[in-house]
Amino acid sequence: MLIDTAEVLEQRKLYNRMPGVSFGNLCFGFMPAFKDFDTGETHLSLNSDGSVALIHSLDGLPLDWITGWDSHGRATELKETVGAGFLRGVEFYTLADLEEFDCDD
């Protein structure tokens, strides 16, 4: 799941269209995460040292979610059923979900 520059720019446009949500300022409690939509399993995004990441990182995801690695052994691709989003408490939100989210809920 390599994200190229065009994809990043497209995601930034989506964030910029959402009132009150930006790359640097999501509503309190949203943490970058991944979900396997086949199993419903979710995992917070982690840094290589195991701490919670502030951005989407493939480090620390289950090995069976990874379908590609670079020459240094770092994950570069995810299986097709895994998507990026955000966890708030125990609820997982996709970017599409956040377009409709009210921070006052």
Image: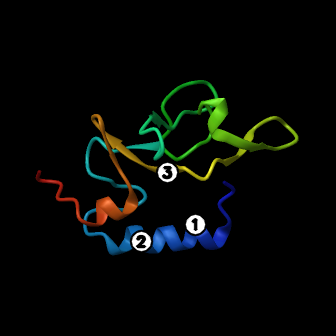
Which residue type carries mark 3?
Ala
Dot 1 alpha-carbon crowd within 10 angstroms: few under 14, some 14 to 19, many 20 or more: few
Judging by the rendered image, the residue that carries numbered circle 1 is: 8
In the current view of this chain or complex, which residue is farthest to the left?
104
Residue that badge 2 annotates? 14
| For residue 104, side relative to residue 69 (left or right) | left
Camera-nearest label, 1 or 3: 3
The single residue placed furthest to the right in the displayed view is 71
Task: Looking at this view, name the residue that lies furthest to the top.
Answer: 50
Residue 38 falls left or right of residue 25: right
Binning the other alpha carbons within 10 Å of mark 2 as few (below 14), some (14 to 19) or many (20 upward) gives: some
**Residue neighbourhood size for the residue with mark 3, other residues' Cα within 10 Å, grouped as few (<14), some (14–19), many (≥20):** many
The numbered mark at residue 84 is: 3
Residue 21: percent from left, percent from top: 31, 61
Q: CA distance from mark 2 to mark 1?
A: 10 Å
The quadrant where residue 88 appears: top left
Sequence-earlier tag: 2 or 1: 1
Is label 2 in a helix, a strand or a loop?
A: helix
Instruction: Confirm or deny contact between disc 2 and disc 1 (CB under 8 A).
Output: no
